[in-house]
Image: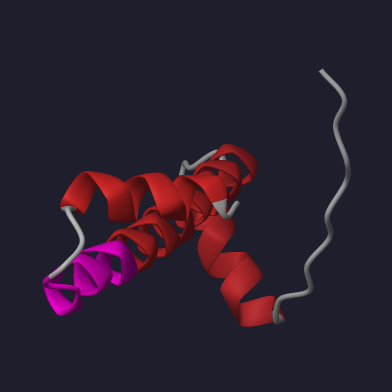
Amino acid sequence: MNTEVVSIRIDKETKEKMKKLKINWSEFIKEAIKDRILQEERKKLLERATEVLEKIASSPTSTAASIIRNDRDSR
């Protein structure tokens, strides 16, 4: 796996509190980043689906299948 290094700066008080807890902070941060990425991807997918549904609802002459096909073809 190809990896990159990301650094952050935190104040001393926070660092001391982190030391007292038995948490693998590196893993915690990696998982938090992955979770946020997934959350944002789902948000974009939902927005796209909403756009398609709005097109379907506002187009009384077109069928849902034709609107979806046109949307897919436009990508």
Q: Nearer the viewer, residue 46 or 30?
A: 46
Measured along the vertical axis of the image, is residue 17 above or below residue 11?
A: above
Q: Nearer the viewer, residue 61 or 31?
A: 61
Residue span colored magenta: 50-60
Q: Position of residue 5 (x, y in %)?
A: 88, 46
Residue at x-position 61% and y-position 80%: 13
Q: Position of residue 16 (x, y in %)?
A: 60, 67
| Residue furthest to the top | 1
Residue at x-position 17% and y-position 54%: 63
Measured along the vertical axis of the image, is residue 72 above or below residue 45?
A: above
Is residue 34 rendered to the left or right of residue 4?
Answer: left
| Residue furthest to the front | 61
Residue at x-position 58% and y-position 37%: 27
Q: Position of residue 66 (x, y in %)?
A: 29, 49
Q: Main secondary structure of the magenta part?
A: helix
Queried whether the magenta region covers residue 8, the answer comes back as no
